[in-house]
Amino acid sequence: MIQRIFHGSDHIIERPLFGYGKAYNDYGLGFYCTDSIDMAREWGASRLKDGFANIYDIEIDGLAILDLNDSDKCILNWLAVLLQNREFDTSSNLAFDARNYILDNFLIDYSKADIMLGYRADDSYFSFAQDFLNGAISYRQLNNAMHLGKLGQQIVLKSEKAFDRVRFVGFDIASSDEWFAKKEMRDNAARSEYFNIERNRRQKGDLYITTILDEEIKQDDTRLR
């Protein structure tokens, strides 16, 4: 099966290279893509410079695909991967304990994945995760917050096998004036919804990180579904 994917960048990338990139991205070293050309346009454009939405086809049959949004997983699996790869402020005792507990109990082995699928932690979404670690929002609110702004999923090529399957199709120019503005609008909308609605919408029975730690809640707990 052939899947079309897109990668936003400030330059044209005809041949993605395995083993290059930033190791501290959301899911570690890899080639970060999306199934939405509009999202790639937003990622590619910057405030002062046009960007590119690089277009690829990839043969996915036979590849090991790890979807962090599968029904047998929860948002804490996604957060654990993020905690392993990105820098979080864990200066408070609660955030420090939360980080260690989530890594110890919810980190899944993704070393054999050819491709990973999951949420993209843009600045606002990263701050939502930070709030959860500090006990400011509940587990339910974190789940809901990840859908604000309709950021969608990212598709991350992780293995050399996956890189060998990619074929460059072409590119689309992402105008800075249009697509950076849309990116800012999306981010601002997510933040506005979060602070005006979601962050203050506590519900009876909400599950907070303090309860997860105190009760030593694990992956199979039904409250995480």
Image: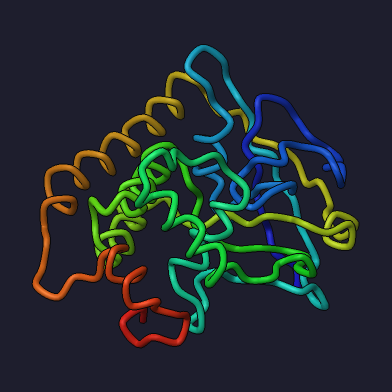
**Image quadrant of residue 184?**
top left
User: Foreground residue, 75 or 88?
Assistant: 88
Q: Position of residue 163 (x, y in %)?
A: 85, 54
Judged left or right of residue 14, residue 125 is left
Q: Position of residue 9 (x, y in %)?
A: 65, 31
User: Foreground residue, 91 or 130?
Assistant: 91
User: Foreground residue, 36 or 134?
Assistant: 134
Q: Position of residue 104 (x, y in %)?
A: 56, 67
Picture residue at 36% right of the left edge, 42% below the top: 92
Judged left or right of residue 82, residue 193 is left
Residue 70's place in the image compared with 120, above or below, is below
- Quadrant where the N terminus is found in the figure: bottom right
Which color mode does the image show?
rainbow
**Image quadrant of residue 68?**
bottom right
Single out the residue that lies furthest toward the top: 48
Residue 25's place in the image compared with 4, above or below, is above
Give the tally of numbered discs. Answer: 0
Judged left or right of residue 105, residue 181 is left
Judged left or right of residue 6, residue 68 is left
- Quadrant where the C terminus is found in the figure: bottom left
Q: Position of residue 77 (x, y in %)?
A: 52, 68
Residue 17's place in the image compared with 1, above or below, is above
Picture residue at 45% right of the left edge, 26% below the top: 180
Picture residue at 50% right of the left edge, 35% below the top: 42
Picture residue at 32% right of the left edge, 71% below the top: 214
